[in-house]
Image (cartoon, grey):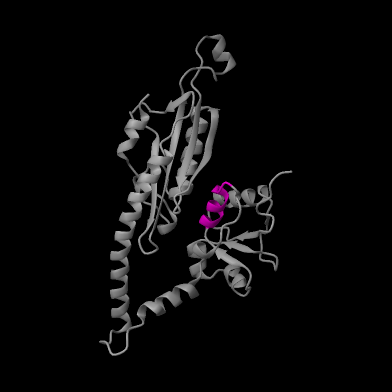
Amino acid sequence: MPRRPFSKVVLCSTHDFGPDRNGQIQRWVESNGGRYSSSMTPEVTHLVATEQAFKQQVDLVRQVRQSKKTKIVTFDWLEDSLLRKSRKPLPTDKYEHDDQKRRSRKKRQNRQPRGGMFIGNSEAKSVNETAAVAGGCAEIAKYGAALDREAQRNELDWKMEGYHIYCDANGFTYAVNLVRQDILAKFSERCMIQVFESDDDRDGDDDDNAAGNKPYAYAAECRYLDRNGEVHSLMVAPRGSSLDLTMDLFRRYFRNRCGVEWGTEGERAGSRGGECFVYQAAAKVEAAGSK
């Protein structure tokens, strides 16, 4: 009997994630035993919303906020849940679009000890943000070092039997490092997408085989190191794919992760703020690409 980890989930979304991701949301939920609803109903347990939709309080968000049981979460909640080995839904605390919680935290930050010098709200905000950023930078540096050690232990740059990392005609090695950091929330996540080329021609096309000139086969895989130090893997393009298909799936996955097209001037900066990963070159990439 197939697993149904999302059997208790009825999910709705704000439909503004782009055509690729909108389709992914419904397929992922239904293929894991959940239900997808195109509109808000009393049965909906989760609304996946973009930050922009939440800030603008679109109709779906307004309807959900009247319900006490429905959680308004980011796309990361769905993606991180399905990247778990069990694929069970994660707790929503770290993924909720909840401005009431943010206001509560802000109120606590602005509290001052009795008898001390009075600081106005705007000054307190500036002081608190500066302290948070300073503390966050130190925490990120400490956590980043731990992630580096974890990445080495779990081999984020890994090997695929019968394949080597693909290097194009311009000498670029397709072991692409992506990083997402939030200084104020004090977390960092990393993933690497690798494109592979077969070592030999055993997966070639029959017509080319007869001519004795079998083409190479290709594949693409992503490994993701989450904020808890756990490594997850996802096959982006299956083994034996053509180069055109593999690169098309690679570019599509990069766009979904980073919010920009691969090969453009903006590829090193995400377009959706904290929701996006950012492409970073790594010293280990060249070594990983050697045959």
Q: Residue furthest top?
A: 211
Q: Residue 215 location, x and y as percent?
A: 50, 19
Position of residue 189 measured from the top left corner of the image (x, y, whole percent): 42, 51
Residue reaching furthest bottom?
115
Task: Work out whether 38 lies above or below 165.
Answer: below
The residue nearer to you, when weighing 118 against 251, is 118
Is residue 155 left or right of 115 when viewed as pictured?
A: right
Can residue 18 be seen from the camera position used here? no
Q: Magenta stretch?
A: 75-85
x and y, in percent, of residue 145 in the image: 32, 50
At x 32% / y 40%, what residue is drawn?
A: 282
Residue sitting farthest toward the right: 1
Q: Is residue 148 left or right of residue 220?
A: left
Residue 123 visible, this angle: yes
Residue 48 x %, y % = 57, 60
Dividing the picture into quarters, in which one does residue 37 lie?
bottom right
Identify the main secondary structure in magenta: helix
- The stretch drawn in magenta includes residue 227: no
Question: Where's the C terminus, which quadrant?
Answer: top left
Work out whether residue 96 or residue 150 is closer to the camera in this orientation and state it. 150
Quadrant where the N terminus is found in the figure: top right
The question of residue 79 being in magenta is answered with yes
Can you say whether 108 is above or below 267 in the image? below
Q: How many marks?
A: 0
Q: Is residue 224 left or right of residue 11?
A: left
Q: Residue at x 56, y 54 (%)?
A: 78
Left or right of 14, for residue 200: left
Q: Identify whether 125 is placed above or below 157.
A: below
Which residue is at a point 57% across and 46% down the rendered structure image?
85
